[in-house]
């Protein structure tokens, strides 16, 4: 039975409904159906589907090969061999010719539009070959056709890396990490087949990964773009690159960088293990959960402890019964003994990632976690969300970073990358500019369970100073955001609330109360006051990008003045522990329901 469709793949991001912005479902005959019943035919959907189909076939080969190694069922070996040989037979027809459908901005591929897609696919095929080659009979079955395919793939990888790094001078690109991963695994697969490796051994590719990691990562461990997904993307590529390596023999500087990348995930994850998806990346997609699980499994073999237990548990919950078991078969990824975790591995307290500008504010008294985006724009994968404030709890995303739908959707740039999709400030209902912010204060006092972060930007809105201070006080979260015009002219400023849960607004005297309803009766309470006349409008809006058609209430809080200060106080609980919030002579006064009073100064 044929497993592989003998046709070139396109760009998977085109596999999206143009009407609803949701990723399409599987092919049904010649139609590609969306969640809401749309039936789409032809291009670009057919070639986009082929990407997913080819990637699934490669994963099937990898899974079956490793299942055979674990359990010895000949049917698994036969299935893996069939997929690998079918791809080899088809690639023999096309590997001399570049894909003519590639777009000008892409690194041109052969089996796919993009060499990047080819590299991701090739890592799975190469790993399957390495495992299958343990058996002499399987090596003979694969033989020259598979070695020829791998050699041609390696030529493509080498040429693509040359174009990207030498011609385009783009060594920091996340593509480079995947080209190196593919090069390393293909080289390893060729060696397993006793075939020539004309582009050097695996050490060459590991050395190139060391070179890439030195320029693509900040000292705080973040991949330079500041996108959660592309951080995962690059980390996964690095871990794949080192297949078969002795942990103790890896470059110490590289190991330290990898550890910081893992610590980013530990320090950034919500209390339930959910990773906030800042900037470009899928909000909630099976493929990403599988990628996170693979990272957790491989990192767990590089060190004896990673701190990723809750992250892995979250990924497994989201995958559920859809899991084919591959990641649980990836034992023995390295050849040596796991390294001891560093003694200064990041804990789960509040943390500032100084290079990327993300502040994570936590409290021992509450599961409420705030993430302040005070970093650079992030390039092509960045969003116009300077000084946005994202809120997460245990088992609920109150006000999450929304991610983006597949890139073929007009909603990626038309909505989700824009300021209006994010909980930050805009002026005159216009998008922010591509900009950076700076963190000016960062104070953490575990003894009093308080964290304070203050940041500002004078480049997000032309002619405006934007400031935000977020403080957690024993589980009470205080958010003060101010916009000030440089020339003293009045402008219309809007502070946005972007819930991912049912949300209601009630006016309360000179301010407002908001109620946020999470699963299992969870509640978040907000109390909001401004220092000038304002209005908080409960309006219809879009939710996170996994399903842009789901209508959700959002909040737009608007005031027109030369300077406006918006103050919000949040707390979780069945009932609000906050009795009232008010402003008195430039100070914030919070009356708690237990009779206590908290006073804080506003921004100076």
Image: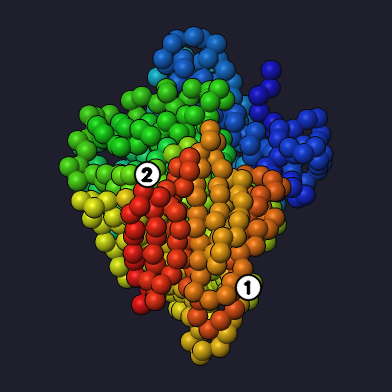
Q: On the image, numbered disc 1 is attached to which residue?
A: 430
The residue lying at 45 percent from left, 42 percent from top is: 573
The residue carrying pointer 1 sits among few (fewer than 14), some (14 to 19) or many (20 or more) residues within 10 Å by Cα, namely some
Where, quadrant-wise, is the C terminus in this rendering? bottom left
Instruction: Out of 258 and 288, give the one closest to the viewer.
Output: 288
Locate residue 159 relative to residue 239 in the image: left or right: right
Query: Residue 485's spot in the image, x, y percent?
Result: 51, 84
Query: Residue 447's spot in the image, x, y percent?
Result: 20, 51
Q: Earlier in the sequence, mark 1 or mark 2?
A: 2
Q: Is residue 351 above or below residue 562?
A: above
Q: Is residue 392 above or below residue 172?
A: above
Query: In which quadrant of the rendered view does residue 339 lie?
Result: top left
The residue lying at 59 percent from left, 21 percent from top is: 82
Helix, strand or loop at mark 2:
strand
Q: Which mark is residue 366?
A: 2
Instruction: Out of 193 and 119, give the one closest to the viewer.
Output: 119
Query: In which quadrant of the rendered view does residue 337 lie?
Result: top left
The residue lying at 45 percent from left, 34 percent from top is: 314
Numbered disc in front, either 1 or 2: 2
Locate residue 296 relative to residue 90 in the image: left or right: left
Does residue 585 appear in the picture of this structure? yes
Where, quadrant-wise, is the N terminus in this rendering? top right
Q: Is residue 215 above or below residue 324?
A: below
Query: Residue 30's spot in the image, x, y percent?
Result: 81, 34
Instruction: Out of 130 and 585, give the one closest to the viewer.
Output: 585
Farthest top residue in view: 73
The residue carrying pointer 2 sits among few (fewer than 14), some (14 to 19) or many (20 or more) residues within 10 Å by Cα, namely some
């Amino acid at each position: 039975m044929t497993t592989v469709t003998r046709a070139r793949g396109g760009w998977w991001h085109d596999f999206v409904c143009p009407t609803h912005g949701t990723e399409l479902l599987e092919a049904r005959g010649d139609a590609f159906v969306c969640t809401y019943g749309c039936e789409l035919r032809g291009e670009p959907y057919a070639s986009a589907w082929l990407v997913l189909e080819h990637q699934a076939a490669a994963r099937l080969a990898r899974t079956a090969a490793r299942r055979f190694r674990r359990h010895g069922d000949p049917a698994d070996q036969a299935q893996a061999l069939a997929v690998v040989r079918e791809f080899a037979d088809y690639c023999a027809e096309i590997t001399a010719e570049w894909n003519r459908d590639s777009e000008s901005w892409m690194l041109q591929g052969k089996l796919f539009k993009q060499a990047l897609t080819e590299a991701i696919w090739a890592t799975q095929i190469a790993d399957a070959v390495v495992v299958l080659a343990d058996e002499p009979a399987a090596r003979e079955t694969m033989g020259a056709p598979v070695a020829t395919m791998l050699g041609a793939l390696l030529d493509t990888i080498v040429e693509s890396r040359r174009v990207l790094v030498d011609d385009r001078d783009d060594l920091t690109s996340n593509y480079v990490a995947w080209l190196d991963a593919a090069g390393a695994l293909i080289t390893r697969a060729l060696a397993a087949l006793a075939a020539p490796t004309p582009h050097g051994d695996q050490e060459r590719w590991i050395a190139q990964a060391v070179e890439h990691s030195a320029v693509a990562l900040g000292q705080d461990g973040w991949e330079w773009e500041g996108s959660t997904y592309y951080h995962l993307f690059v980390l996964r590529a690095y871990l794949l690159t080192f297949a078969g390596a002795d942990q103790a023999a890896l470059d110490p500087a590289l190991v330290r960088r990898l550890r910081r990348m893992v610590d980013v995930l530990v320090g950034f994850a919500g209390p339930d293990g959910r990773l906030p998806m800042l900037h470009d990346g899928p909000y909630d997609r099976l493929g990403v959960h599988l990628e996170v699980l693979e990272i957790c499994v491989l990192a767990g073999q590089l060190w004896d402890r990673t701190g990723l237990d809750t992250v892995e548990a979250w990924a497994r919950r989201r995958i559920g019964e859809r899991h084919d078991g591959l990641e649980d078969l990836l034992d023995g990824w390295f050849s040596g003994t796991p390294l001891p975790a560093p003694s200064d591995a990041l804990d789960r307290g509040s943390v500032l990632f100084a290079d990327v500008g993300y502040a994570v504010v936590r409290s021992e008294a509450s599961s409420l976690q705030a993430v302040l985006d005070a970093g650079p724009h992030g390039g092509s994968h960045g969003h116009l969300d300077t000084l946005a404030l994202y809120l997460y709890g245990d088992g609920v995303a109150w006000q999450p970073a929304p991610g983006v739908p597949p890139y073929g959707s007009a909603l990626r740039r038309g909505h989700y990358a824009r300021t209006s999709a994010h909980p930050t400030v805009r002026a005159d209902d216009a998008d922010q500019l591509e900009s950076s912010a700076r963190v000016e204060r960062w104070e953490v006092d575990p003894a009093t369970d308080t964290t304070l972060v203050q940041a500002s930007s004078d480049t997000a809105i032309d002619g405006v100073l934007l400031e935000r201070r977020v403080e957690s006080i024993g589980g009470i979260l205080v958010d003060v955001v101010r916009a000030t015009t440089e020339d003293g002219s009045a402008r219309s400023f809007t502070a946005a609330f972007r819930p991912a849960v049912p949300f209601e607004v009630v006016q309360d005297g000179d301010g407002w109360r908001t109620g946020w309803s999470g699963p299992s009766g969870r509640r978040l309470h907000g109390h909001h006051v401004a220092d000038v006349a304002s209005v908080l409008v409960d309006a219809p809006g879009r939710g996170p990008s996994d399903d842009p058609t789901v209508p959700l209430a959002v909040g737009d809080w608007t005031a027109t003045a030369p300077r406006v200060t918006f103050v919000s106080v949040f707390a979780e609980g069945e009932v609000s522990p906050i009795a009232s919030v008010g402003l008195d002579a430039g100070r914030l006064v919070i009356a708690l329901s237990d009779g206590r009073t908290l006073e804080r100064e506003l921004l100076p």
